[in-house]
Amino acid sequence: MDTERVSFEQLAGISACFALAVLSRITSLPLWVPLIVILCGAIRLFTARNGRSSPPRWLVFTLAALTTPLLFLRFHTFNGLDAGTALLALMGGLKLLETKTRRDIYIITLIIYFVSLSALLDSNSFWLLAYLIAVSWLTTAALLRLTSRGAAPDWRRCFRHAGRLLGQALPLTLVFWLLFPRFAAPLWQIRSDFHGAQSGLSDTMSPGDIDKLALSDEIAFRVHFEGAAPPSRDRYWRGPVLHDFDGRTWRVTELDFGGAPALQPQGPVYHYTVMMEPSHQRWIFALDWPVHSALEAAGLTSDYTLMQAFPISHPIDVVATSYSKARATDSLNPRMRRRDTHSFNGNPRTLQFARNLRGEHPDDMDYVRAVLATFNQQPFYYTLTPPKLGNDSVDGFLFDTRRGFCEHYASAFAVLMRAAGIPARVVTGYQGGTLNPYGDYWILRQSDAHAWDEVWIDGSGWIRIDPTAAIAPERVEGEMADATNPDEALASRWQRNAGWFAGARLRLDVLREIWRERILDFDQDSQQRLLKMFRIPEPDGQKLVMVLAAAMGLVLCWLTWQVRRELDPRSNDAATRAYARLCSRLAAAGLPRLPHEGAESYAARVARQRPDLAHTVTAICRQYSALRYAAPSTSITLGQFEAAVRTFRPRHSPK
């Protein structure tokens, strides 16, 4: 049993693999769990380094007795993905602490594979999958090296062997992926416990909200147009519409799915697919003005917000249709008019300014133009770092600071409209986007978040007004000059100057999108289409299982042949394989080797029958004997022997 005991090198190798596996789940584990794992590994490595055995068993039992109840108090269960993984990681750390024999290494290796699998179930990231494949490859190579009964093979050979094992498993993986009956939803959607902080727009807007998103490079969604994309001035992606204002904060007051008012199209129609990232919100960002969606669970609210019945917890594709311009065919509902002209307390200077300006411009559109001219002609500035505002935030912005972001201008404009009796509301969403020429789709990032207004003009309906666009370009402060052009590939100047960097990012995004479309979205319908490609009539679950069984049988036969071939010492010996090629070439030249002949006896007979081949064949056969039977020598290498066989091309002897 002494030969079965693990060494310091073996412990260090398996500990490194275990640490890499736990790292993949670091965000979902309580902080003290990886700390306990690190502590256990450090103690065991310290004892092994000093030539001692594992710590006493009472230490392992004490740690288990203390940490297991803590884990239960944290999750209130041992079931579920997060709780189960935390328990598995904790048990792996304790097992590492008491590791003595190779059997313990085998158990830890299994734990590494299970922890890696749990990370894959928790995320649909392509990069995480690549990382976990690398961890599995390294773990398999370490296992081959650490459990060798003879001299430990070099790492290059172990990595090559581990790669061959993973390659042999690939066909079986592909068969299971394509043909194993799919769940109604992806595995990662089965998780229902969401604890992370959501990113993106919300159903409220206060000064300072959207400017936080303006610095975020996170992708909100992607869009693919069937034809030409609309120009930048029409690429407004509609999200939450805010109606209620308390003097500082705008809110969504109601979600009326009674049906959006009818619209008369006046601009081009656009057909497109919105590829939403998980936002854990219900709204889907659609191009103004949406009139149709192919998603059964989605519908339009009375203010033309496209929403679905449940939060978006996994990537979805939404096919939609929008018109760049439209007008209402009916008059404004009295209830909606009261809602969108609702008075509020506070901001007295703003109200007085609106009354004075309204007296000079009784026509609604003239009044709208007058307010926009105020923003353009007076010293208002556009900045990401505006001064703080007091309770009367609109008064402070319009008459004191005059510095703000899109939310400041949208809020102030809507207040000025309502103070003049014109129905107005604030729309939040995204504007512009980045064209990815490598994938023919547009990318909308959180930095494209925007807020604008809509006002009701009798006879025209709701009209989109973007007061931020009224700010003169020379009054855009700091890095906001980069953010005001939505068609730039990246927001920051240094990234744009490094063209290779921007191009690499866009190519990587295409790779992520292919991963999502081809892998993550492969569902039951995709399997049905696959069976139809195989020309299987009326494909159903029973036929799918039959095809799966047939494919598995073929792959298992191939794997059996591969294993038998590797276990055959003759086929596994490179020198023997090269010698077999030499014999086959001599046989083709009319000099077959007899079953009883050794290499040098065979060479002697060839030399008697074909003197022209005597020198070459004798030299090659002697090289084979030296490689196959003699002690290791530097006089001839396997590469030299294989090269000599490759260049040997005997011909039939002349008659």
Image: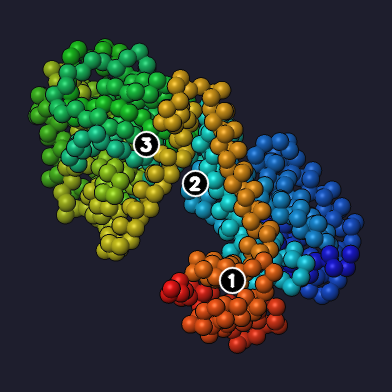
Which labelled disc corresponds to residue 275?
A: 3
Mark closer to the chain start, 3 or 1? 3
Q: Residues within 10 Å of mark 3 (few under 14, many from 20)?
A: many
Residue at 32% x, 43% y is 444
- Residue type of the residue flagged with mark 1: Tyr
Query: Type of residue at label 2?
Result: Ser
**Quarter placement of the N terminus:** bottom right
Q: What is the number of the mark on residue 125?
A: 2
Task: Find residue 251 and report its horizontal and vertical position in percent.
Answer: 38, 29
At x 23%, y 54%, the residue is: 481
Q: Secondary structure at mark 3?
A: strand
Question: Between 434 and 392, which is closer to the camera in this rendering?
Answer: 434
Q: Nearer the viewer, residue 532 or 27?
A: 532
Q: CA distance from mark 3 to mark 2?
A: 16 Å
Q: Label 2 to label 1, Cα distance in Å?
A: 48 Å
Image quarter of residue 41: bottom right
Residue on which the image places disc 1:
579
For the C terminus, give its image quadrant: bottom left
Query: Residue 149, can we see it?
Result: yes
Q: Nearer the viewer, mark 2 or mark 1?
A: 1
Going by the numbered disc 3, the residue's amino acid type is Met
Q: What distance separates the C-alpha of mark 3 from that of mark 1?
A: 59 Å
Confirm whether residue 26 shows in the render.
no
| Sequence-first tag of 2 and 1 | 2
* Horizontal and vertical percent position of residue 588: 50, 66
Q: How many numbered dots are placed on residues in this image?
A: 3
Q: Name the residue located 69 percent from the left edge and 41 percent from the top edge.
A: 83
The dot on residue 558 is: none
Residue 369, image x, y percentages: 12, 34
What secondary structure is marked by label 2?
loop
Where residue 602 sits in the image (x, y, percent)?
A: 62, 75
Which of the pair 525/391 is nearer the observer?
525
